[in-house]
Amino acid sequence: MRKIFIMLIISSLFTAGIIVQTTKQPNIKIHPLSINNIKGFRTVSFVLNTTLPKVPKKMMVYKCVEPNVTPEYASVIAKRFGMDGQPKKVFGEFILTDGNYHLEVNTKSGRIAYTDASRWMVGNNIDKPSNLPSDKKAIEIAINYLSKKGLMPADATLRSVTHPKVVAMDKYGNTIGVGFEDVKISFTRKINGFPVVGAGSKLDVEIGGNGDVINVYKVWRDYRPYKKYSIITPEQALEKLKKTGIFTGIKSVDKAEIDKIYLGYYAKSASEKQTYLQPVYVFEGYAKGENRIEKFKQYIPAIPSPEG
């Protein structure tokens, strides 16, 4: 009898920020991008599969508005989701569980995470492919839901539609059954035409069977203009990347193929306090080595570190 293995398939992309020092600039207290707990390895060769972007000489640095996450605010958010009870503060979170529903509101970033724990990423009889709305309908459901809850940002634009799932596989890796599947609607944002990148800019709504919303994740910091700073050139950023190497799970990278280079603003993860949105160069591509190929997305700060 063949053995059946249950696998949770969740696509994710791990990114790392690299701190680079360049020419002297006016003093600015921007927190360096963190690479804690990330293991990186130098690459042997780089292949550029794209042209270097045309960029402005200066970019505005934005100051993050610190969220005012009070017990009253957390209670208001809970009521918007139809939950009863007062969220309790546990370290840097306000947390409330009401039956099958779980809510977390982070005090550092204002991140909101709402889940139907009885269904989300759990095998059940409702969240099956045959019960899901079409992608087009799911987008409509997500936008209407966020708007009614007062959680739809004015600057949000559709980024992607995906289908997270839990599947059963045989010992050969063939899918033999789907225990769970939903439709995940993801939104993104831009500042002056530049995308906000990093784990700290995220808005996802997951639609399950019968069009039910079973998961909402939002971290969307407010900001205001601070000051313009000169940025390094794409050539300089590429050289910094080559010196630093590509950070992936591959221990010995033989080649890194760069397919995209663009400017953006880096947002830290929801658990971190952020003072400024920092301009960065984003490099995307594929790392190759050890008979493996992995996608990578890596950031090089476009302005010098605070020390110059």
Image: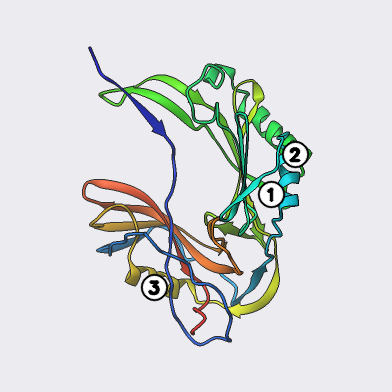
The residue located at (66%, 44%) in the rendering is: 87
Q: x and y percent of residue 77 in the render? A: 72, 44
Q: Identity of the amino acid at label 2?
A: Lys
Q: x and y percent of residue 49 in the render? A: 39, 57
Q: Is residue 33 above or below residue 92?
A: below
Q: Is residue 129 above or below residue 18?
A: above
User: Which of the pair 210/244 is nearer the observer?
Assistant: 210
* Tag 2 secondary structure: helix
Residue located beneath label 3 in the image: 240
Q: x and y percent of residue 276 in the render? A: 61, 70
Q: Are marks 2 and 1 in contact (CB under 8 Å)?
A: no
User: Which is nearer the N-term, disc 3 or disc 2?
Assistant: 2
Comparing labels 3 and 1, the label whose residue is closer to the camera: 1
Q: How is the image coloured?
A: rainbow
The residue located at (66%, 61%) in the rendering is: 191
The number of numbered badges drawn on the structure is 3
Q: Identity of the amino acid at label 1?
A: Ala
Residue located beneath label 2 in the image: 79
* Tag 3 secondary structure: helix
* Tag 1 secondary structure: loop
User: Which of the pair 16/244 is nearer the observer?
Assistant: 16
Mark 3 neighbour class, 10 Å CA radius: few under 14, some 14 to 19, many 20 or more: some
Residue 224, by quadrant, is bottom right
Task: Determine whether, in the image, residue 172 is placed left or right of residue 168.
Answer: left
Residue located beneath label 1 in the image: 156
User: Which is nearer the N-term, disc 2 or disc 1?
Assistant: 2
